[in-house]
Amino acid sequence: MSRILIIRISGFIIAAVILLPVSSFSQIMTVHARLDTNEIMIGDQVSFDIEVRRNKDDIVIFPGFTEKLTEEIEIVSKSPVDSFWSKKDKKYVLKQKLLLTAFDSGLYYIPPLEFLLIGRHTRDTVSTAATYLEVHPFPLDTTNTIRDIKAIEKAPVSFSEIYPYVLLVIFAGLVVWFVIYYFRRKEKKQPLIGRPKIEEPPHVIALRELDRLKAAKLWQRKETKMYYSQLTEIIRRYIEGRFGIMAMEQTTDEVLIEFEGQEILSEKDYELLREMLTQADLVKFARAEPLPDENDKHFENACAFVNHTKYRPADLQVVNEKEHEIAV
């Protein structure tokens, strides 16, 4: 009896040693592949779901899928391999989905898929179970009689069909409008965007600047030279805008010569201009110190000169123009 027992124990030990790699390997990785359905019609699509469970440090290499799974079964699309950690069995779960189709009827064999496992102490392949896919042809209705081919029917025009042409017409209209708008603004010398800038007459600008100069009270604060510099600059700019004489770049004598022999200034206005410019030169270059009455007098002469010589061209329109009249 003892001998028989020893033989049985030895056989059990041998079987355990033989089956140990298989059982331990099964604990390393498992693979499954299944079809949503095993029967489809020609041209229909079926999902082929693949699931792999592996240990944390192992590496799994999936089969290299091409355009066909078999000669008859085509792969329409394949998803990327998705992975997540399963707390339940402490495994990494890898999933991939293949979308399959077939265009010939028949019963087709799907062979096992082989996955390469690379572990710390293991390198082997694990295969899925084989399966079958049956593709059915479309049933023929033999009860119907043969009929003539139907005539071509005209489908109604949809908005999506005419939408591009509507956009094209709108775009062409905008281009034509922009070209006309551009040349009209250019002809009138107006800016392309925004309202046209209304140019003020020279006398409006000069009288406004004289107002500011008077409010600054420069000579009252012993800044006489600055006062006469600004006063003559205002008048010189007015002369440039009103008469077209480059007074800012000329000396007093040159400016006065421009007016000699021309009937654009009265004798009184000429004298007002001469006295004011001459006095300003004495202050700026000879350090003259005019009396307060003289400062007021030359300011009034400047205002009088502008008011006496101002004009508006017949075609000049000023919107909401406010003239500055300073008592002389």
Image (cartoon, rainbow, N blue to C red):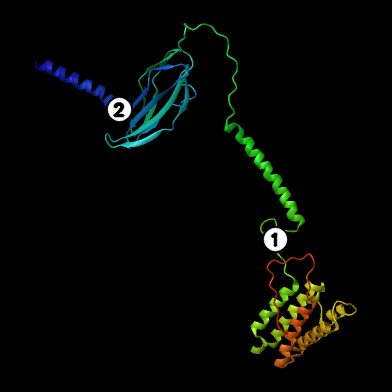
Q: Which mark is residue 277?
A: none
Q: Which residue is mark 1?
A: 196
Query: Which is nearer the eye, 9 or 67?
Result: 67
Identify the amino acid type marked 2: Phe
Q: Is residue 154 left or right of residue 5?
A: right
Q: Nearer the viewer, mark 2 or mark 1?
A: 1
Identify the amino acid type marked 1: Pro
Q: Is residue 232 visible?
A: yes
Residue 34 screen position, x and y as percent:
36, 23
Residue 217 screen position, x and y as percent:
65, 85
Task: Place residue 258 in its image quadrant.
Answer: bottom right
Q: Is residue 190 left or right of residue 274?
A: left
Which quadrant of the figure contains the C terminus?
A: bottom right
Q: Which mark is residue 25?
A: 2
Seen in the picture, residue 237 relative to 30 is either above or below; the reply is below
Q: Residue furthest left?
A: 1
The residue that appears at 72% across and 67% down in the rendered structure is 318
Residue 255 screen position, x and y as percent:
83, 79
- Regarding mark 2 in the picture, which secondary structure is present there? helix
Which sits earlier in the primary sequence, circle 2 or circle 1? Answer: 2
Query: Which is nearer the eye, 54 or 269?
Result: 269
Query: Which is nearer the eye, 182 or 14?
Result: 182
Residue 95 screen position, x and y as percent:
38, 31
